[in-house]
Each structure stands twice: as C-alpha cells, then as structure tokens.
Amino acid sequence: MKLTKTAEYALRILIFMAKKPDQLYTAKQLVEELNVSDKYLRRLMTDLSKSGFIRSVQGRDGGYIFTKGTDKIFLFDIVHSVEGMDKLNGCVLGFEKCSCTNPCAMHDTWEHVRDELNKVFRQTSLANMDFEKILRY
Amino acid sequence: MKLTKTAEYALRILIFMAKKPDQLYTAKQLVEELNVSDKYLRRLMTDLSKSGFIRSVQGRDGGYIFTKGTDKIFLFDIVHSVEGMDKLNGCVLGFEKCSCTNPCAMHDTWEHVRDELNKVFRQTSLANMDFEKILRY
DNA sequence: CATAAATACTACCAATAAGTAGCATATAAA
DNA sequence: TTTATATGCTACTTATTGGTAGTATTTATG
Ligand code: SF4
Ligand code: SF4
C-alpha cells in the first residue's frame, strides 16, 4: 500500500486549482502557492494533462485549466493516473497474487480499511472539497 | 501515507509466527515459508528483536520467539516500530506541518479513511488474526 | 575441544522515486 | 519581427528503500 509524494502533489495541485475551476493557472503560480519544486511540478502537470484532467495552453499567457467539471474528477482517478490505484487498493501485506477468494489471516482486518479508503476515494470528487477551509502547503 | 515493503514483511513474519506463538522459529524456516529475501529478513528480525516483540536465541538450535503474548502486540505497534506509524497516520497530502486545528479542504474526506485505518490497526492484535485462513506468501 | 548450525554486524550494491538542468517550442504583444 | 513569458522534453543527479556479501559471534552436541 503506497501513496507516494507524486500522488500527494497531484492531489494538492488539483485541489488547489479546483477552488476556482475556470481559472487558468500557470506553473509559476502553482509553484509559489504549493510547496512543490518547479521542474517536478511542471513534469507532473504534463502528465496530468495527458491523463485528461487538465489541458495546457502553451505560449505566453499560457497555463493549465480543467478540461471538465471538477465534479467529474474523482480522487480515485487522480491517484490511479499517477501511480496506479492498485497499489493503494491492493493487499496491505503486499501479496501480489492474492485473489481474495481464499483470503489470508489478516484479510478481514485489512478489508475494513481498504473498503473505507476505496469508498471515500471513489465517491469524492474535486467539487466535494471544502473550499471554505484553508488550503495550506 | 506509506506502508513500505519493510512494514509488509514485518507483518507477514509476525502474523505467521503468531499462528503458533510459543514456537521458536529459525530465520531459515521463515525464509522458506514467507517470500522475503534471506539477508533482509535476518536484518528485520534483529530490528524486531530490538523493538521487543520477539527475542533471538543465539547459537545452535537458536531462532526467534515472542517475548510476550500475541494479544499484547498490535498491528499499530509493529508498523510504528519499523517505519513510524506517523507516516501512515499523517496527512494524505503529505503536509508535515498541519496541526489539524485549522484543517484544509481535503481534511474531512481524508479523516474518514485515516480514522478507520487507525482504529483497526490500533485495536487489532496478532492474536486477532484468523488462523483458520490460509497463510500465503 | 571441534564442529555444525544458528544469529549479529558492517559495508557495500541495486532499484526506484524525487528532484534538477538546460534547451526546444509555442504564442501574445510591443 | 523581436522579445518576454509560457509549456514540453530529454537526460542527468540525488535520496531513499530494498537487497546482498562476507565475516564474526554464539552455543548445543559428539
Ligand atoms: S486475503 Fe490476505 S493476501 Fe489477500 S488481499 Fe487480503 S490481506 Fe492481502
Ligand atoms: S487538514 Fe489537510 S493538511 Fe491537515 S492533516 Fe487534514 S488533510 Fe492533511
């Protein structure tokens, strides 16, 4: 089970952008606001563009903007696109092969956590964030 | 949020041992049963010994054995000892500084997952595993 | 005591993730 | 058309984690 920094960054960025979802954000802006290194953020933005959440506008006055309503972008999709939700969704013990039809000794325990995590990530979209609250980084 | 392979291994090993908690297990045995590389397992066993879950018996006929009842060893403690439960327990977005008194936009969402994870790991001991089920690796 | 079978320790190596540098490309506006 | 200000791409460097090698140490037993 793993949620890497890359996934964290992706969430930070998109949640931040979702506050004003029709605005165009430059990498520079995002770097200043969020605490992510410049080049790494840019690379991530390109990935997120390729994943279809946002699109890039090149050239002067360029930046990034959502391609669709934030209510259609779920946290699950974001994590999945940057590192595979499987890794989060899989087995705590890291058993790759488990089919779960014949579960192991820890399964009942783990299932509770995993299900909660899945449910929440699958049903929460960027529009469900509480933007009254502070965005901090 | 991260649960590394090392933590997975620690769980695998101790859960396996917990099936017959009064037995002495050699590293060789564990390596054969579980799917963890020999040297790495040995190093982990030393760490787990230092953490006080098990103790090592040196010399011929040596091995590892629990130092206390498996009902007194919680999954939380295990994860905490090998990599700091903080990392699991902390913020999804990886914000180190958050005090949670003035939470961010994602906090309500994340809290559900984190609380479930915490609750389960804190209240589940090695004795709560379902040893009827297959132990697989 | 010599041997066999176990753990302990130290230092190194490999794989992956994170971060950086530098240049190419695009485009609005003076 | 030049310039300023964006993103895109490729290759490299650094940090972290996972894994390995080799040797020292411990101890039951013949
Ligand atoms: S049954 Fe065991 S091995 Fe399989 S997913 Fe559940 S916890 Fe992991
Ligand atoms: S309030 Fe936000 S930053 Fe703080 S722990 Fe919760 S999700 Fe993380």
Image (cartoon, coloured by chain):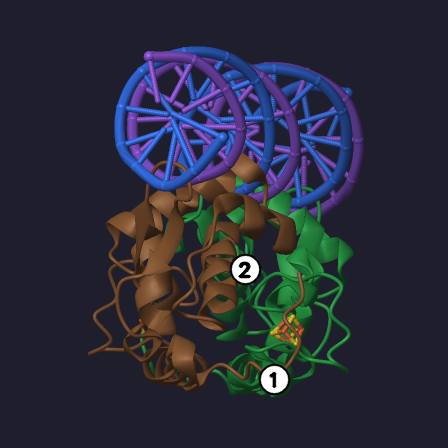
Chain colours: A brown, B green, C blue, D purple
* Residue A94: quarter of image: bottom left
Kindly tell me whether mark 2's CB lies below 8 Å from ligand 2: no
For disc 1, the neighbor class at 10 Å (few under 14, some 14 to 19, many from 20) is few
Q: Is residue B137 visible?
A: no
| Ligand 2 within 8 angstroms of badge 1 C-beta | no
Given the image, what chain letter belongs to the residue carrying mark 2?
B
Q: Residue at x 71, y 46 (%)?
A: B58
* Amino acid type at image mark 2: Lys
- Above or below, A59 against A76 in this view is above
Label 1 chain ID: A
Q: Which residue is mark 1?
A: A132
Indicate the quadrant containing the N terminus of chain B: top left, top right, bottom left or bottom right.
bottom right
Of the 4 image quadrants, the one containing the C terminus of chain B is bottom left
Q: Quadrant of ligand 1?
A: bottom left
- Tell me which residue sits at (35%, 74%) in the image: A70
Q: Which mark is residue A66?
A: none
Label pair 2/1, CB-CB below 8 angstroms: no
Q: In this rendered view, identify the residue nearer to me: B91 or A51.
A: A51
Q: Secondary structure at mark 2?
A: loop
Residue B38: where, in percent of width, then height? 48, 39
Horizontal and vertical percent position of residue A97: 24, 60
Where residue C11 sits in the image (x, y, percent)? 70, 17
Q: CA distance from mark 2 to mark 1?
A: 28 Å
- In this rendering, would B102 be left or right of D2? right
The residue where tag 2 is placed is: B2
Q: Nearer the viewer, residue A135 or A94?
A: A135
Quarter where residue B88 is shown: bottom right
Q: Residue at x 62, y 88 (%)?
A: B123
| Foreground pick, A55 / B22 | A55
Which residue is located at x 36 percent, y 36 percent?
A59
Query: B61 or B44, which is in the foreground?
Result: B44
Q: Check disc 2: other Cα within 10 Å, few if <14, some if 14-19, many if 20+.
A: many
